[in-house]
Image (cartoon, rainbow, N blue to C red):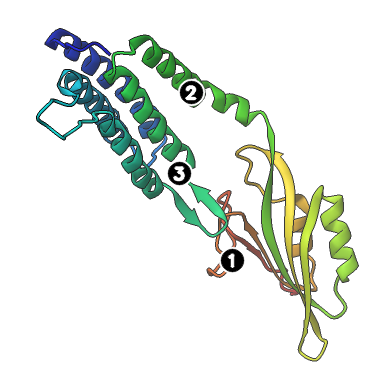
Amino acid sequence: MPLTLDWSQISLRLGLTVLAGLIIGINRGEHGRPAGMRTTLLVCLAASLSMIAANRLLNTTGKAANSFVVMDPMRLPLGVLSGMGFIGAGAILRKDNLVLGVTTAATLWFTTVMGICFGSGQLGLGGAALGLAVATLWWLKYVEAAINQDIRATLSMTIARDGPSEQDVREAITHGGCKIIAWGVSYADQGESVELLGEIQRRVRAGETEPPAFVEQLGRHPLVRRLKWHPQGISSSGQSQQSAIPGTPIAISPPKNK
């Protein structure tokens, strides 16, 4: 960083900082993330301003013969990076076993470092960082969409005594391309009904929310009294009802005999 900094350089650094913060903020805003355009811009500006202030203080550092004070201007950006951790933690939300906002928190942290680059006069490095951020946030999502991922769901069933056996249910799950992670069995009404509870893992394309075919097949069995399929991130303690909306809990009841 140069020892002297005029207002033309300050204006250039701040202008590039605003542009970079707005570009990253547009991506977060269009995806409805809690940290949108204004938050991202303010974070980037705070980091840039801290480096500009540190740059302007460079020619005042040192130790005079009659002074015991030593100024360290680089503590300014260090404090901004430390404080950024609190904002990033506030952007992360946890709902049951589903964690949201991690990408937004990482984006805020990255934007802070990018602002430091622009504020310190490393315009080429800041521009390269902006290009990498655009490629990561806009283009890499298409690569993620093409990759299969493992998701988990909870399956709970109540079966009458003469209904499908536990082994039949396990085979239906396995033949449906799913893997049983955990399994529990309990008996009720003096053995008249069996309650099954399992944690199921399946590999699907990114964004796929439809339940596997065996869920509806088992649910429509006349001796299956109750069946609930809770995808990852949906509380199994909430009241469920039959729904056609993808991603919502599904409760299937057998048809009544007329």
Q: Residue at x 80, y 73 (%)?
A: 223
Residue furthest to the bottom:
190
Select label 1 or label 2 by which is in front.
Answer: 2
Question: The residue under label 3 is which amino acid type?
Answer: Gly
Q: Residue at x 15, y 22 (%)?
A: 60
Element carrying mark 1: loop
The answer to which quarter of the image holds residue 30 is top left
Element carrying mark 2: helix
The answer to the question of whether label 1 and label 2 lie on touching residues, with beta carbons closer than 8 A, is: no
**Which badge, 1 or 2, comes first in the chain's sequence?**
2
Q: Is residue 49 left or right of residue 220?
A: left
Residue furthest to the front:
65
Q: Mark 1 = which residue?
A: 236
Q: Mark 3 = which residue?
A: 101
Q: Residue at x 79, y 70 (%)?
A: 222
Nearer to us in this view, 223 or 108: 108
Q: Mark 2 = which residue?
A: 138
Question: The residue under label 1 is which amino acid type?
Answer: Ser
Nearer to us in this view, 32 or 97: 97
Element carrying mark 3: loop
- Locate the C terminus by quadrant: bottom right
**Which badge, 3 or 1, comes first in the chain's sequence?**
3
Marks 1/2: CA distance?
Answer: 34 Å
- Locate the N terminus by quadrant: top left
Residue furthest to the left:
66
The answer to which quarter of the image holds residue 199 is bottom right
Question: The residue under label 2 is which amino acid type?
Answer: Trp
Asked if residue 192 is positioned above or below residue 211 in the image, the reply reads: below
Nearer to us in this view, 175 or 11: 11
Q: Residue at x 13, y 25 (%)?
A: 64
Pointer 1 local density, CA inside 10 Å: few below 14, some 14–19, many at least 20 = some
Select label 2 or label 3 by which is in front.
Answer: 3
